[in-house]
Every structure is written in structure tokens, then in C-alpha cells.
Amino acid sequence: MQTTKADGDRDSAGDTRRGFLAKVAALACGGLATVAPLAAGVWAFLDPLRRKGAAATFLPVTELTAVPDDGVPRQFAVVSERIDAWTGFPREPIGAVYLRREKGSQQVEALSATCPHAGCFVELEADGRCFRCPCHNSTFTRDGGIVQPSPSPRVMDALECQVSESGAVSVKWQNFYTGIADKVARE
Ligand code: FES
């Protein structure tokens, strides 16, 4: 079939239009690829449970009256909201702490129940006099000190603890790297 000059002009105009649309589409995709991670980063920064140091948020754990002043540690769950990517989940346990206080004291000492050796759950012995980790038998005194010999490279991880005027006990919840001598917070 014979092609006229008018046909050629139409083809050329069509090619130009298609090229233009392809560029617009590419720009839009590129823009999305840039904006989406940026938006996620902004969201992660603004969300107190996800940003750096988020794990260091003070979380309410119990009441002072639930921690008898007999020096014996008591175990409490640390409960918080879990946020996974864009989805929020109901409040659920994210860890556990041992709280104790001495006779007549209003101050509460808090220890993470996570073993500093490899992250297993440290258990309180039945007599309440020491802790033992069932994984590799690290033993700790009830104030968190190491009983040697011990696979754990450091004492149990102490956590900051606050008692409000109304008697609410809150713990600054943090996870720490395991297997090293220094207590270094995970971010
Ligand atoms: S994880 Fe606790 S002793 Fe190894």
C-alpha cells in the first residue's frame, strides 16, 4: 500500500505522543519510588515505638503494691502495641522484667528477664534467692550479679524504673545486644 506524506506526519505525531506518555509514566514511577520510601521514613521517625530509642520508652508495668518490700524479685510482663510495617496490632507482651524492692523502700529495681548470654528467658529459682538461665546455666544473684563460672559475659541488664506519686511503676524498656561484655542498647 502506498504511504502518503499525510500518513507519515500522522505516524510521526503518534510516535511523539507515545514517547511523551512513556516519559510521563517513567517520571511518575520514579517519583513514586522516591516518595514511598521517604514517606515510610517520615512515618517511622514520627512513630515513637519505631524510631531510634523507641524501645527506651517508659512503659507502665504494675503498681507499687504488687512489689512487696521483701527483696524478692517478682516477674512482670512488659506490654505494648506492636507495629509491623503499616499495621498496628493490639497491645501484647513484648518482654518481661523482674522487679524488687528492699524493706521500707519506695524505690524499685528492675532487671530485664532476657539473658545477656544469648537471649533466653532467665528464671527465678523457687526459693527466690537467685536467677538461673535454663539454656546454658548462667546463674545470677537476685540483684542481677553474675555467679561464676558463668557463660554470661555480663550481669543481668538493669532497666530504669520510675514510681509515680500514685504508685504506678514504669520501666524504660530496652533490648540489649547479647553475648558481649558491654551493655549496648539495640536500636
Ligand atoms: S542464653 Fe542464658 S546462659 Fe546462654
Image: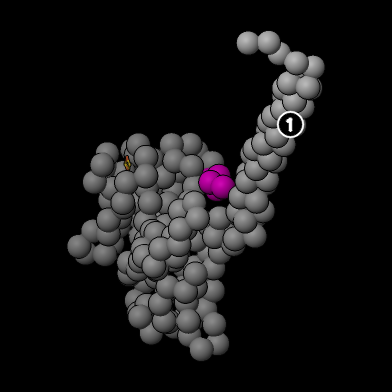
Quarter of the picture holding the N terminus: top right
Does 55 appear above or below 34?
Answer: below
Q: Residue at x 40, y 77 (%)?
A: 62
Magenta span contains residue 185: yes
Q: Position of residue 137 (x, y in %)?
A: 26, 42
Does 171 appear above or below 178?
Answer: below
Q: Position of residue 103 (x, y in %)?
A: 41, 79
Does 183 appear above or below 64?
Answer: above
In the displayed structure, does residue 30 sit left or right of residue 170? right
Foreground residue among 5 and 16: 5
In the displayed structure, does residue 51 sit left or right of residue 68? right
> Which residues, given as a range, are shown in magenta?
183-187
List the residue tagged with mark 1: 17
Q: Residue at x 27, y 59 (%)?
A: 124
Q: How is the image coloured?
A: one colour
How many numbered markers are drawn?
1
Residue 131 visible? The answer is yes
Q: Residue at x 35, y 68 (%)?
A: 76
